Image (tube, coloured by chain):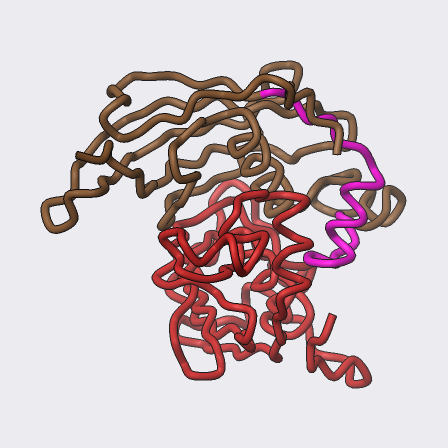
Chain colours: A red, B brown
Amino acid sequence: MSDTTGNATPRPTLYLDDLSIGDRFSSAEHALDEQQIMAFAQQFDPQPFHLSESAAKSTMFAGLAASGWHTAAITMRLLVTSGMPLQGGIIGSGGEISWPQPTRASDILHVESEILEITPSRSRPDRGMVKLRSETRNQHGELLQLFVSKLVVSRKPG
Amino acid sequence: MSDTTGNATPRPTLYLDDLSIGDRFSSAEHALDEQQIMAFAQQFDPQPFHLSESAAKSTMFAGLAASGWHTAAITMRLLVTSGMPLQGGIIGSGGEISWPQPTRASDILHVESEILEITPSRSRPDRGMVKLRSETRNQHGELLQLFVSKLVVSRKPG
């Protein structure tokens, strides 16, 4: 993988109590290429427009495009490795996802996230829910994926 | 991959005009295992509860669990190879996803889909939108993922 994540510096880990509505997080970058797109598609989404530049030409995509699930998976990697330093990890229960335009082989992806809501759990004092808006954009600033997710986040002990 | 898809029989390909609200589709099965879970996680979701049975024990998942994006990706493979024979392929613009319970290494997944809405495009006579509800369940019938998606589907030419 070609993330530009700086692994040398330990990142802080945030509890629910450390977060505020409007907090923003920016991830490192991930450079895509044809090989990654085709390898993911062969395993999980074997359709012509994800498997071959020539076969993709005559489809609705008019050229090779990454599977939306590939864009989603790369987004998750960027969030986990550089985009959202949550104590206990990034655990989502679901959300709303959309792909406004295809992800292409020449795209360099990064993720910009913003906290929309914070809801401490009534029944479980050790956690809460966070609604997070994550935009996956390429190097031209074009929006490739929007994911508004519900995350389970740990509270500070004691 | 261990899909039980019968690749020998060509499947019919359906246009928007061939679909009705309430139509149901059932996919083949996909057997998961620890190796698949860890391989996906290493590439796209490197968190302890997806990477190692022992590390996962002390987490919210209390044992190894597949990344939700892995469940989503397997669901897509099952839809593409056996679950939804659409002319022109399965092209989604987005949807609402949730993971009611973790996917485990011993799970055998299949997908049950139902058409909820069919909307011919006003501006593009060659296509329409379909709202599809896809339930990913294991061999015990437990719901692992619910995905209500918006698909772009081709209309019959002429």
- In this rendering, would A18 be left or right of B56? left
* Residue at the (18%, 36%) spot, across then down: B119
**B141 to A120, vertically: above or below:** above
Image quadrant containing the C terminus of chain B: top left
Q: Position of residue B75 (x, y in %)?
A: 56, 35
Q: In this rendered view, identify the residue nearer to me: B54 or A51.
A: A51
* Residue at the (35%, 31%) spot, across then down: B132
In the rendered structure, does residue B40 fall within the stretch colored magenta?
yes
In the image as oriented, which residue stretches furthest toward the left?
Answer: B122
In the rendered structure, does residue A72 fall within the stretch colored magenta?
no
Which contiguous range is marked in magenta? B28-50
**A112 to B55, vertically: above or below:** below
Image quadrant containing the N terminus of chain B: top right
* Labels in figure, total: 0
Q: Can residue A78 be seen at all in this image of the molecule?
A: yes
The secondary structure that dominates the magenta segment is helix
Q: Can residue A127 be seen at all in this image of the molecule?
A: no
Q: Position of residue B36 (x, y in %)?
A: 78, 41
Q: Quadrant of residue A84?
A: bottom right
Q: Position of residue B47 (x, y in %)?
A: 74, 56
Q: In this rendered view, identify the residue nearer to me: A100 or B34.
A: A100
Q: In this rendered view, identify the residue nearer to me: B41 or B152.
A: B152
**A138 to B27, vertically: above or below:** below
- In this rendering, would B111 be left or right of A78? left
Q: Position of residue A55 (x, y in %)?
A: 51, 52
**B107 to A73, vertically: above or below:** above
